Amino acid sequence: MPFISLLRVVLISCVIGLFHAANSFAAGTQKAEPEVQSLRILQSEPLKIETISAPWDSDLKAWIIQAVTQAVIILLAILGWFLSNRTISRQLDARRREEQREYKYKQLEAEGKLIRQYLDDFYRPYLRLSDTNKKLHDILKAKQSNPKSFRTLIKLLEKYEFSLNDKALVDEIISIGGQLTGLIVEKSGVVDNKSMHNELVEASRHFRILRMANEGKICKEEERFVNFVYPRQLDDKLRDEIEKLEKQLCEIEKRKEILSKEIAKGERGL
């Protein structure tokens, strides 16, 4: 459609130019004599006869020159418009691609920032605290008469008398459990895995029951609370999730680097 409109403009311009040129030619020819040659008697002596050419040739040349000039002007105008429009179109396309790259770069930045927030606010702190708790628990079990069957919660429910050092270990384990419970309550919203979320709920329940047993708020009824243990598979799942998020973060950084180079190259080209 733009080409058809342009063609119409060109044709109309040419017709107008030729019409003006024809009018100019007609105006010049109306003043000219129709004869090809005419005789003029000069008043000086002796009598001379001079041949004078009619203005047809000069007017025709002028009309042709005028028509050609206008046609050339129109063609140059069209060529200039075409080249200008093409240049502008290329610049707009380049700018559009540049904006798309910048938008994608900002999206990747936001995505990477969110993943770092997940890792730094929940996954890594939780796993560090959980690993510390496990090591403290291993130290506690190592001094017991039957380490393999030792259960801290059961011993607390039985009102078992821990040594001074073991009691300090138990208190620290429960304190760290409180920190883990706080992370679960405040930060576990980042977890979108339903199975992992359920296991975090079980872990929080375990830490709360362990704290109440240590404070003496609950006791005995070991069979009632025996199954409220910490889900050990949870830590392995957390490690897998951390590894997955770190890979995603690495991939995002690679894509950002590629886009950054393309943006820099595009800015030099504009």
Image (spheres, helix red, strand yellow):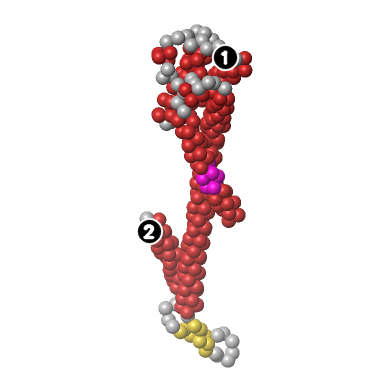
Which residue, as the protein is rendered here, is positioned at the far bottom?
46
Choose the circle earlier in sequence order: 1 or 2: 2
Amino acid marked by disc 2: Ile
The answer to whether residue 144 is left or right of residue 222 is right
Residue 230 shown in magenta: no
**Number of numbered discs on residues:** 2
Can you give x and y, in whole percent of width and height, for residue 255 in the image?
Answer: 52, 47
Q: Where 267 falls versus 246 (above or below)? A: below
Residues 222 and 50: in front is 222
Label 1, secondary structure: give it. Answer: loop
Q: Which residues are magenta?
A: 249-256
Tell me if mark 1 has few (under 14), some (14-19) or many (20+) residues whose alpha carbon lies within 10 angstroms of its own.
Answer: some
Q: Residue at x 50, y 65 (%)?
A: 76
Residue occupied by mark 2:
4
CA gap between label 1 and label 2 equals 96 Å
* Disc 1 target residue: 162
Percent across and percent down for residue 208 are 49, 16
In the picture, the quarter occupied by the N terminus is bottom left
In the rendered structure, which amino acid carries the disc numbered 1?
Phe
Q: Main secondary structure of the magenta part?
A: helix
Which of the 4 image quarters holds residue 226? top left
Residue at the location (55% across, 29% down)? 131
Q: In the image, what residue occupies the spot 42% across and 81% down?
A: 35
